[in-house]
Image (spheres, rainbow, N blue to C red):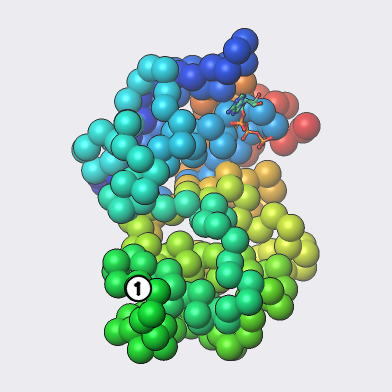
Amino acid sequence: MSALISARELAISFGGVIAAEDVSLEVFEGDHLAIIGPNGAGKTTFLNICTGYLKPQAGSVTFQGKSILGASPRAITRMGIARAFQIPQLFTEQTVLENMLIAVASQARRFAPFTSLMKIPERKEAEHLLVLVGCDDVMDRPASELPEGKRKLVDIALALALKPKVLLMDEPTSGVASSEKFAIMDTLLAALKEEQVTSVFVEHDMEMVSRYANRVAVWNAGHIQSQGTPEEVLKDPEVVRTVIGV
Ligand SMILES: Nc1ncnc2c1ncn2[C@@H]1O[C@H](COP(=O)(O)OP(=O)(O)OP(=O)(O)O)[C@@H](O)[C@H]1O
């Protein structure tokens, strides 16, 4: 299996706070990799480095063998690493379909102020992505009216419109009622598999990790404390003590 993202010996600190030190991690094609760890361990910092929002003070990150350090977030997205839930707010007055059309049209660099959205050739693709995330039933509703679960799934469809190879997510189901979380993750993972998108997601809920991740990396105080399969990692006494027990 080939590594899509390869991070080597990353280091970054903010004042006296070490957010990454000697962080090395590979994300392989087809992975659904969960990042777990206590608050402030450096999980989001890693996502920020991989998406160009932060530049490490040392180390390297390659995507498909090519360095991404110094590239802008926009350039990195175009290379194939997207981030969900970071896309600016949905256009709340517009319908869900109109939001999707804006996303697919701008990805195709086709968006012009006076273009009729409904006539763009990518309309089928926009509708397909909404079907894939189970949101075709709300495509004509204004984005402002969406319940949180649907909104999360529309956010995923918007991220998929960027045609990523890897999708990075910070707590995909945060803010969603616990009764809905599994259904949302089932839909999300099925959509990623269908579109052959690898994923990395920060997660605090260990049941989510054991159900949906094939690999887990455990962050602690800016370091990767351990990594492996959920079965291996979640029963490691040190992980139980530092992460699950807290
Ligand atoms: N831009 C920044 N400026 C200053 N300090 C920062 C910055 N980004 C992160 N930090 C600090 O680095 C440490 C790691 O932060 P990070 O957000 O990566 O942790 P985390 O594991 O994602 O935490 P949480 O689970 O609470 O979201 C924290 O102490 C945080 O306050």
Which corner quadrant of the figure contains ligand 1?
A: top right
Looking at the image, is 204 positioned above or below residue 41? below
Q: Looking at the rendering, in which quadrant would you find the C terminus?
A: top right
Looking at the image, is 235 positioned above or below residue 33? above
Q: Residue at x 38, y 17 (%)?
A: 58
**Residue 208 location (% of width, % of height):** 64, 54
As rendered, which of 231 and 57 lies closer to the eye?
57
Task: Using residue 148 as the reference point, say whether residue 128 is left or right of it.
Answer: left
Looking at the image, is 147 positioned above or below residue 18? below
**Residue 160 location (% of width, % of height):** 42, 65
Q: Which residue is mark 1?
A: 112
Q: Residue at x 62, y 27 (%)?
A: 41
Q: Residue at x 56, y 37 (%)?
A: 44
Task: Using residue 246 as the reference point, say whether residue 77 is left or right of it.
Answer: left
Tag 1: amino acid: Ala
Callout 1 secondary element = loop
**Residue 34 location (% of width, % of height):** 53, 45
* Residue 137 visible in this rendered orientation of the protein: yes
As rendered, which of 242 and 125 lies closer to the eye?
125
As rendered, which of 12 and 172 lies closer to the eye?
12
Q: Residue at x 36, y 81 (%)?
A: 115
**Residue 26 location (% of width, % of height):** 36, 36
Looking at the image, is 141 positioned above or below residue 148? below
* Residue 193 visible in this rendered orientation of the protein: no
